[in-house]
Amino acid sequence: MRSLRKDFSLSALIAGFIAVMVSYAGPLAVVIEAARAAHMSDGQVSSWLWAISIGSGITGVLLSIYTRTPVIIAWSTPGAALLITALPNYVYPEAVGAYVACALLITIFGVTGLFSSLISKIPAGIVGAMLAGILFKFGAGVFTAIKDWPGLVVPLVVSFYCAKKWLPRYAVVVTLVLGVLLCWGGGKLDLSTLRPSIAVPVLTMPKFSLEALIGLGLPLFLVTMTSQNATGLGVMKAAGYQARGNLLVTSTGIASLLLAPFGCHAINLAAITAAICTGPESNQDPDRRYVAGIACGGFYILIGLFGLTVASAFAALPGSLVSTIAGLALLGALMTGLSTAMGDERTREGALVTFIITASGVSFYGIGAPFWGLVGGMLVHGLLALRLRAAAEKSLGAAPRKLMPSAQK
């Protein structure tokens, strides 16, 4: 506790808050849409939100304290998007059974080390390019939002860079406060419909069916591991942290397994929100950014306790405010990703392909662009590496033949 008090900073606290705000202002809508498509009851929806929030919060706090790094945990947004079309095809207990199977697979991949052994083979430049591709739309979104609400976005951008000059540690804090004040003054914050209510978990015993395991559990596992855990570990690696992938993935798998009967489809390493907490805006000292992970987890727990009430409060914030704050907070991480991507000439072309594919947002078979960006970049890198290796071997093979005449003489 003495160390935590010493390392505490307001900027880290605000970074954790912004990460949670981004999570609930955007991905939460995907969860709600999936619940509506499956005609879930209010109690089941509230329990679902409680499970993913509490699971993300407790796991993030414990891992951040234990590893002394900003470990940000969130629910699987691509998984929730998958559920929009897949969940209506199964009865709810079968879906819970699929959640349990998915969590078991995640845990097995973490315990056996299969996940880390695969990730360790990816060059840092390609990981940085993937991060930059993920964050590009958020950075661009700041300036495209000017067209929608110039009276809000322009003052926020100006205040952010002014604060970067005089108060660099609190640039995001100053911008967030100004944004809330402008929205409140402009009558854009309507919280009149909010009513406090405590979330009540609903236990559902899992029912296992082959159809649900193959049609829901396996795809959920694939999109969670490729689009979330691989990306989240890449974000931490790009920020300079030696993330213990086995520990992190195993922990999220166990947490998902325990909370699956309450509606948790999957929790995992965060990517976008992790970049907020692992970047310099959180704290200039990388060794003190773990406080942002603790703060983020604490806010998740608070929201989980109040379920739909606090979630609806986040949803009440104007989208232009959320996108602008998120984009500005992620500019530092975007710059780091681009620098890492282009820093090594040997991986530069593969990194470029990774960046382009990831930034394009293309998706195949329910698997998002970050995974395909990694695949494309690694293929290009591998082909170029083979060409260089063949050229080097040819050069070495030709050297002795040049020496033969002199040797005979």
Image (cartoon, grey):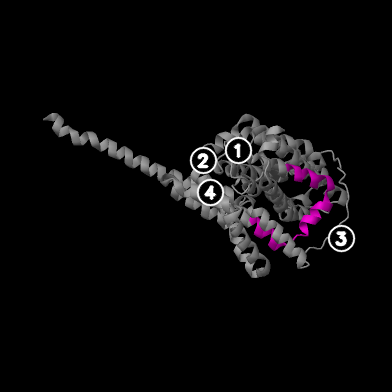
Question: Which residue, given by chain and number where applicable, does mark 4 sit on?
Answer: 336
Label count reads: 4
Q: According to the image, label 3 marks what residue?
A: 193
Badge 2 density bin: few <14, some 14–19, many ≥20, Cα 10 Å = some
Q: Mark 4 belongs to which amino acid?
A: Thr
151 shown above or below 277: below
Quadrant where the image shows the N terminus: top right
CA–CA distance between discs 2 and 4? Answer: 17 Å
- Between label 3 and label 1, give the one nearer the viewer: 1
Q: CA distance from mark 3 to mark 1?
A: 42 Å
* Principal secondary structure, stretch drawn in magenta: helix
Q: Would you name the residue on which mark 2 appears?
A: 122
Q: Amino acid at mark 3?
A: Thr
Packing grade of label 1 (10 A; few <14, some 14-19, many >=20) is few
Residue 408 picture location, percent across and down: 13, 29
Q: Residues within 10 Å of mark 4 (few under 14, many from 20)?
A: many
What crowding class fits label 3: few (fewer than 14 Cα within 10 Å), some (14-19), or many (20 or more)? Answer: few
Whether residue 307 can be seen here: yes
Q: Is residue 183 magenta?
A: no
Tag 3 and tag 1, C-beta contact below 8 Å: no
Q: Amino acid at mark 1?
A: Asp
Q: Which quadrant would residue 85 be assigned to in this image?
A: bottom right
Residue bearing mark 1: 287
188 above or below 362?
Answer: below
Distance, label 1 to label 4, CA atoms, is 17 Å
Ranked by sequence position, the earlier of labels 2 and 3 is 2
Q: Are dots 3 and 4 in contact, CB under 8 Å?
A: no
Q: Which residues are the magenta region?
A: 297-326
The label nearer to you, 2 versus 3, is: 3
Nearer to us: label 2 or label 1: 1
Q: Of the residues under marks 3 and 4, which one precedes in the sequence?
A: 3
